[in-house]
Image: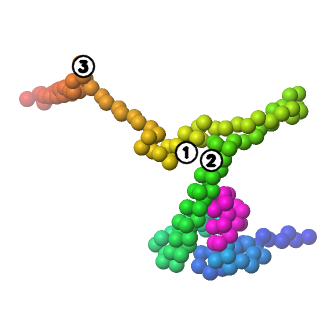
Amino acid sequence: MARSKKEPPKKVGPRRYIKKGDIRTAKEIQDDFLEQYEALGNITLACKKAKVPRRTFYNWMDDKNESNAAFIEAFETSNKIAIGTLEAELHRRAVTGVRKGIFYKGKKVATELQLSDTLLMFLLKAKAPEKYKDRVANEHSGPDGKPITHDVTHHVIFTDNGG
């Protein structure tokens, strides 16, 4: 019995590969990706959900190719939406909280509401950076607070060539 060879993906249009049986147009594939990206906020996950190779996404983002301009603009809009989605989830976990189960001897006996102080701090830093940003000031000085001085010594070695 002869083994069937796995067919490579068909090339459809410039630099776009689709799997056999995928009847979506390039625009539909891009729209599917953008929809997934808005919901997930992650390129890798959006590519998997939309069944798009990551390399294809980066080809679409190549600004040297003028035909990619519309996708790049659409992605910038989708990125703003994705950031909003992620911020909403961050807010939910920090302010509203997440119910987690409490287990005893392998059985769920209760739930508790867990809030995240760390996520709340990230929200504050994003919304009011003038008040909550990290402030670090590194100052270096020499003895008694004076400037640091560097002494440079040059050693010159003369060799006698037996003259």
Secondary element under disc 3, as helix, strand or loop, is helix
Residue type, mark 2 in image? His
Residue 96 or 7: which is nearer the viewer?
96
Residue 77 or 54: which is nearer the viewer?
77
Please report whichever mark, 1 or 3, sits nearer to the chain's N-terminal start.
1
Q: Is the magenta stretch mostly helix, strand or loop?
A: helix
Residues tagged 2 and 1 counted as in contact (Cβ below 8 A): yes
Residues tagged 1 and 3 counted as in contact (Cβ below 8 A): no
Residue located beneath label 1 in the image: 123
CA separation, marks 2 and 3? 48 Å
Is residue 39 found inside the magenta-colored segment of the image? yes
Identify the residue at the far top of this view.
144
**Res. 37 image quadrant:** bottom right
Q: What stretch is highlighted in magenta?
A: 30-51
Q: Quadrant of the N terminus?
A: bottom right
* Left or right: 87, with 1 as reference point: left
CA separation, marks 1 and 3? 42 Å
Q: Which residue is drawn at 60% across and 36% down?
A: 117
Secondary element under disc 2, as helix, strand or loop, is helix
Vertical placement of residue 52 versus 67, above or below: above
Is residue 146 found inside the magenta-colored segment of the image? no
Please report whichever mark, 2 or 3, sits nearer to the chain's N-terminal start.
2
Residue located beneath label 3 in the image: 143
> How many other residues sit within 10 Å of disc 1, few (<14), some (14-19) or many (≥20)?
some
Q: Residue at x 78, y 70 (%)?
A: 6
